[in-house]
Every structure is written in C-alpha cells, then in structure tokens.
Image (cartoon, helix red, strand yellow):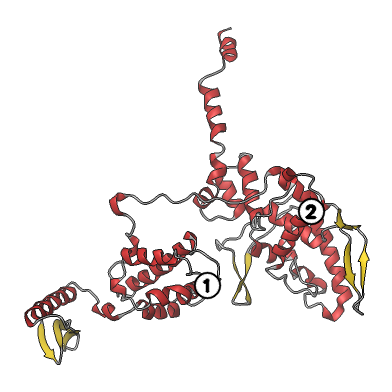
C-alpha cells in the first residue's frame, strides 16, 4: 500500500518497489500539491487517487522518472547522443535549428508524459498563424515545415522510448482515428518541357547577342556622358556548360556534381562515377556520402564528355598561368582536382551554380526568346534539371526501377511518389495498348476472317 505523509501544505507519497541486488528496499517517492480551492475532503480524495495511480505505474514497470522530464531536458540528452557521425551534419543542424527556433520555445516546458496527438495538433495550429515566421514574411509556416517539426518531436519521443523513459511514442498513432488518414497533397515539381530543354541546351552551346540599351554613365570626376545602344556577343563559359550538361544528363544533385573530380569521369565510356556529395553547414563545407550512401555510374552522351575534355585542357592551362597561386593538385596528380573550381583551384562554392543558372535563363529570355511561348520558365531552379531528366526518361518509356537507378533513389517507391504525375500521364498510352490487344479494329478483324 502507498505511504502518504503530509509535509506542510504538500503530501509525500512513497511506493515500495521490491529490493535491489544488495537486498536494499527500493522506494519511489513523489510530492503531491493540492489546489488552494480544495476543501479537506476533496484534498484527501485527490491525494489517494494520485497515490493509487502512482502505485499502478510502479507495479506495471512504468519509468516514473519520465514524469519530471521536460521536452527541453530530453532534447539536450537527444542532441548529445546523436552528434555526428551518429547522424549526418546536415540532419543534426536541422534538428538543432528547429528545436532552438520553435519547438523548445513553444513546447520546451511540457512534460514528455503529457505530450500526445492533441499537443501536436495545437502546436501545428500555432505555426499556421501569421507572425510565427522569423524571416519577417507574412503568413504562417508551410505544411512541409510544420511536418518536419512534428517529425523532430516524434524522433525525440522515440528516443525516450529507446532510453526506457516512455513505453510507447504516442505520436506514432496520432491522426489514425476512424481507421483512415487525411489524404496528403500530391507532390509536384517544376521542370523543362522537351522543347524548353532543347532551347536550354542551345543557350549552353551558342553565342548570344546581348542588346544593351542606351544609358547614362558617370566619370570619375562626376561628369556624365551617354552610351549609345550597342550589341555584345556573349557565350557561357565552358565551366558552366559542362556543369549544366552533367546536371541534366546525369540527374545528379548540385552537391554531387560539385564533388566530382577528373578521376570520376571516364572519357572513353562516358561514365560519371558519383560517390560523395558536398554540403555546407553553418558556413563550413563538408564532404559526405551521397544522400542514399550509395555510389552510381550514370552514362552521358559523347558531346558532354567532349566538352568536359575541353574544360580539362583549360583548367590545366589556368593552373600553369597561376603558378604558386594554384592551390589544387599539379603534375601527375592533376586528375585529383575537382572538375568545378574557383579561380585558384579550390572547390567551387555551393551557391555559385544557382546564380549562374538564373543568369543564363534571364539572358536567354531577354535576348533570344521571340514570344511568350519561347520563354524559359524563371520558376525552374537548378535542382529542377534533375526533375527534367526524370520527366524525359519516364515519358519515353523507361521503367521506374531504371529511373530510380539513374537518379540514385534507394527505393523505387521514392521515384513513384515524387514523379507520380509523369507515370500517370502514361495511363492513356496503357489504355490504348489494352484496347488494341483486346478489341482489334474492324480492319484487323476482317483481315483475321479472310
């Protein structure tokens, strides 16, 4: 039976929980504080109810220590245990950032035993309110950001289960009432159409005449003068041509393309060996495994490798001209250099390709496109070259397993989830095949009769 002892305005409840290996008695004690509004009879009943519930928890093997652990305290233990290399640096940074920005300020004082589906529902509602964003933009957070926050909280509670603080993660079953879940919004992506992709490739390989309007300039002494309208011939540097070609024809992610060295390119077979990726976390650059921790060797067309060979010659020439300023490899080890570098041989900055990609689209639209239909969509991002590759492969009949292999998806289900729209567009083609097989045209039927 629980032992109840009054201590001032509070009550101390003690539960006996057997003996340890040394024969010493194990006890669990908790303090109960009644509300000021309760009378003596109500207080007595509430104390007894609390004592009975505590005894049930102890007898059923429940770790009562969890009753005093807040989500903030649990997060400290969690982050200490999952430090890199236990998880990727990018993942650890994302955990830390979400906890510091929102989760702990809002839910940090909640006891982990009190967190349930309702708690998370209220938390999600708060994140949808205007003013919650830290970037000053209006409106609440996107559903994607909210779901990522919820995933972090769920990871914390799963960690509590692993540590024996909780018997089950309550969020695993939240949202599964009535045996069904709310249908999620279909994942959609931006991409170039086949015609737009051809225009993009044209822009990579051809000179563009940039038209400069007449404008006013200022001299060093402050006087002004007019510059007449003129045309300048411009062509994308070979470095960027190769970068965008490899991005398109391999479907690789930006960090994977930036990580390529000359040793990864086979100029005879056209194979591009992809083993590592580059990420930037809190201003520091790191190399890590690819997203799926697996290497792959996509094959690119001959003209892409010819352009890469041209870039290699140019890079060797630049390294000789720079002399001691070249920080990359030299001589017999030259092929250990990154394919895409800064002016002095250092690895290219992760942000550079995005800026050059947008600049190319802007130059093409302003100087080449003759109508609205000819414009390259400015909403398309560098990463959308990967989606473009997928759409072209799928629309031309490549099966999902092969597409997953090209894109480096560990599970073809991921490919189906992301590109379901492209696969679904082939439903009409499938219907025509079934009709032609099972219901031949009248002409074919006559031929069969004859």
Question: Which is more N-terminal, label 2 or label 1?
Answer: 1
Count neighbours of disc 2 (C-alpha within 10 A) and say few if under 14, some if 14 to 19, many if 20 or more: few
- In the image, 252: left or right of 121? right
Determine the residue located farthest toward the left in the rendered image: 41
Viewer-nearest residue: 420 or 367: 367
> Which quadrant: the C terminus?
top right
- According to the picture, the residue beneath numbered tag 1 turns out to be 134
Viewer-nearest residue: 262 or 39: 39
- In the image, 209: left or right of 10? right
Viewer-nearest residue: 229 or 313: 229
Determine the residue located farthest toward the front in the rendered image: 223
Please report the residue visible at 73 percent of the width from the left and 45 percent of the height from the top.
372
Residue 157 is drawn in which quadrant?
A: bottom left
Count neighbours of disc 1 (C-alpha within 10 A) and say few if under 14, some if 14 to 19, many if 20 or more: few
Please report the residue visible at 75 percent of the width from the left and 60 percent of the height from the top.
359
Q: Is residue 288 above or below residue 427?
A: below
Q: Is residue 92 above or below residue 30?
A: above
Question: On residue 366, which mark appears?
Answer: 2
Mark 1–mark 2 Cα distance, whole angstroms, equals: 35 Å
Question: In the image, residue 279 lies at what x, y percent?
Answer: 62, 70
């Amino acid at each position: 039976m629980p032992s109840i002892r009054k201590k001032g305005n509070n009550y101390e409840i003690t539960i006996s929980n057997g003996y340890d290996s040394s024969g010493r008695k194990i006890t669990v004690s908790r303090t109960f504080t009644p509300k000021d509004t309760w009378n003596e009879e109500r207080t007595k009943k509430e104390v007894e109810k609390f004592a009975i519930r505590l005894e049930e928890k102890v007898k059923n093997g429940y770790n009562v220590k969890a009753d005093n652990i807040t989500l903030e305290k649990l997060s400290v233990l969690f982050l200490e245990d999952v430090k890199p290399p236990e998880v990727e640096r990018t993942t650890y940074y994302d955990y830390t950032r979400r906890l510091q920005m929102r989760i702990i300020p809002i839910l940090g004082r909640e006891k982990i035993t009190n967190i349930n589906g309702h708690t998370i529902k209220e938390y999600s509602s708060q994140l949808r309110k205007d003013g919650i964003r830290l970037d000053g933009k209006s409106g609440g957070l996107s559903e994607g950001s909210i779901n990522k926050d919820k995933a972090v909280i769920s990871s914390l509670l799963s960690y509590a289960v692993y540590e024996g603080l909780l018997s089950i993660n309550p969020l695993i079953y939240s949202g599964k009432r009535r045996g069904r879940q709310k249908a999620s919004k279909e994942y959609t992506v931006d991409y170039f159409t086949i015609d737009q992709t051809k225009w993009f490739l044209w822009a990579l390989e051809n000179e563009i005449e940039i038209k400069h309007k007449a404008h006013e300039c200022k001299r060093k002494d402050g006087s002004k003068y007019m510059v007449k309208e003129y045309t300048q011939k411009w062509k994308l540097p070979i470095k960027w041509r190769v970068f965008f070609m490899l991005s398109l024809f391999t479907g690789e992610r930006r960090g994977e393309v930036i990580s390529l060295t000359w040793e990864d390119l086979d100029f005879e077979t056209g194979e591009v060996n992809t083993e590592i990726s580059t990420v930037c976390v809190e201003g520091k650059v790191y190399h890590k495994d690819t997203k799926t921790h697996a290497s792959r060797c996509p094959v690119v067309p001959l003209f892409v490798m010819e352009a890469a060979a041209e870039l290699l010659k140019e890079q060797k020439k630049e390294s000789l001209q720079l002399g001691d300023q070249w920080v990359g490899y030299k001589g017999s080890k030259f092929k250990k250099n990154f394919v895409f570098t800064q002016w002095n041989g250092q690895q290219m900055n992760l942000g550079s390709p995005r800026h050059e990609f947008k600049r190319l689209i802007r130059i093409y639209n302003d100087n080449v496109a003759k109508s609205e239909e000819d414009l390259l969509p400015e909403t398309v991002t560098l990463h959308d070259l990967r989606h473009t590759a997928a759409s072209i492969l799928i629309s031309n009949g490549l099966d999902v397993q092969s597409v997953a292999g090209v894109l480096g998806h560990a599970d073809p289900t991921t490919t189906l989830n992301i590109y379901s729209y492209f696969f679904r567009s082939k439903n009409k083609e499938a219907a025509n095949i079934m009709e032609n097989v099972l219901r031949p045209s009248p002409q074919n039927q006559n031929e069969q009769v004859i």
